[in-house]
Image (cartoon, grey):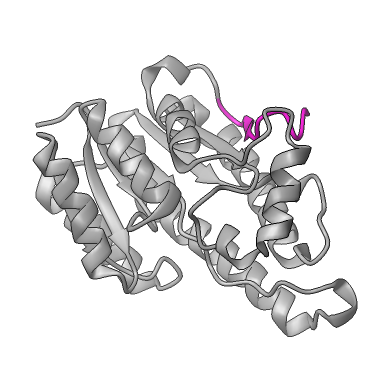
Amino acid sequence: MSDQVCLITGSSRGIGAASARELAARGHGVVVNHRDSATDAEAVAQEVRAAGGAALVVQGDVTDPGDVARMVDAVVGQWGRLDVLVHNAMTPFPVTSFADLSWEQLGTKLDQEMRAAHLLTHAVLPGMIDRGYGRLVYLSTGLSRRPRNGMIALGVAKAALDSFVRYVAAEVAPHGITANIVAPSTVEDTAVSERLPEELRAQLAAATPMRRLARPEDVARTVAYFASDDAAFTTGSWAPVNGGLIMP
């Protein structure tokens, strides 16, 4: 079997799919999670298997406690352990100004964002603590630090996630577990970027020192670094993948 077992949430397309392929290429077993994209998820898994890797597809809603427990049980039942959690799944959010944003919209996004992170982290930590090893990688966004018109719900929810991860990192570090944040700018071929007008995507690319948007593969390589032992002494970090757009 492979070196590590990695669960990647929301990995039927975009950053999640690229992360599954990258981790598999590095010799890890990958678990491709989807909520309602079975065909796409199986295509990612088949691609991994065709390249000689090991892949398991698990369906589940990351905001549903029963689904999360079932997903983790399926992984452990198949491979006996879970070494890496890559929490990439995106919950819905409105694109609107604050003036038009209702509390119900913002509260729903905050609840779903933090519910998913809390449920998944709680589900995977006991096994990691027992083994004295684990890698937690969470996908955030540069919008949690650099506001953009219309993106207040996403930016605020991801800022809450950023803080959550730092607290988790501090608590689990004595157990040999790291927790880090990967924060890309707008990424091509993702559900978020497809909601933006082509003109805005072009403007964002032009404003980036490297003169293009991020690609899923750019983000996946950073995810793979934090999933590896190369990052064994790095925890609680916030890693931008944005071509120089934000330099913290």
Main SS type for the magenta part? loop
Please state, as top left, top right, bottom left or bottom right, where the C terminus lies in the image.
top right
The vertical placement of 147 against 108, above or below, is above
Is the N terminus in the top left, top right, bottom left or bottom right quadrant?
top left
Q: What residue do we see at 72% from left, 84% from top?
A: 104
- Seen from the viewer's position, the closer of residues 203 and 110 is 203
| Quadrant in the picture for residue 2 | top left
Q: Position of residue 216 (x, y in %)?
A: 46, 42
Is 83 on the left-hand or right-hand side of 45?
right
Compared with 205, 36 (above or below) is below
Q: Quadrant of residue 176?
A: top left
| Front in this rendered view, residue 217 or 79 | 217
Question: At x 64% / y 38%, what residue is drawn?
Answer: 166
Viewer can see residue 155: yes
**Residue 130 appears in the rendering:** no
In the rendered structure, the answer to whether residue 11 lies left or right of residue 101 reads left
In reply to whether residue 240 is colored magenta, the answer given is yes
Highlighted magenta segment, given as a residue range: 235-248
Of all residues, the one furthest to the right in this rendering is: 99
In the image, residue 187 sits, relative to residue 180, either above or below, namely below
Please report the residue visible at 30 percent of the width from the left and 64 percent of the height from the top: 69
Q: Position of residue 188 (x, y in %)?
A: 53, 49
Q: Position of residue 177 (x, y in %)?
A: 44, 30
Residue sitting nearer the eye, 193 or 56: 193
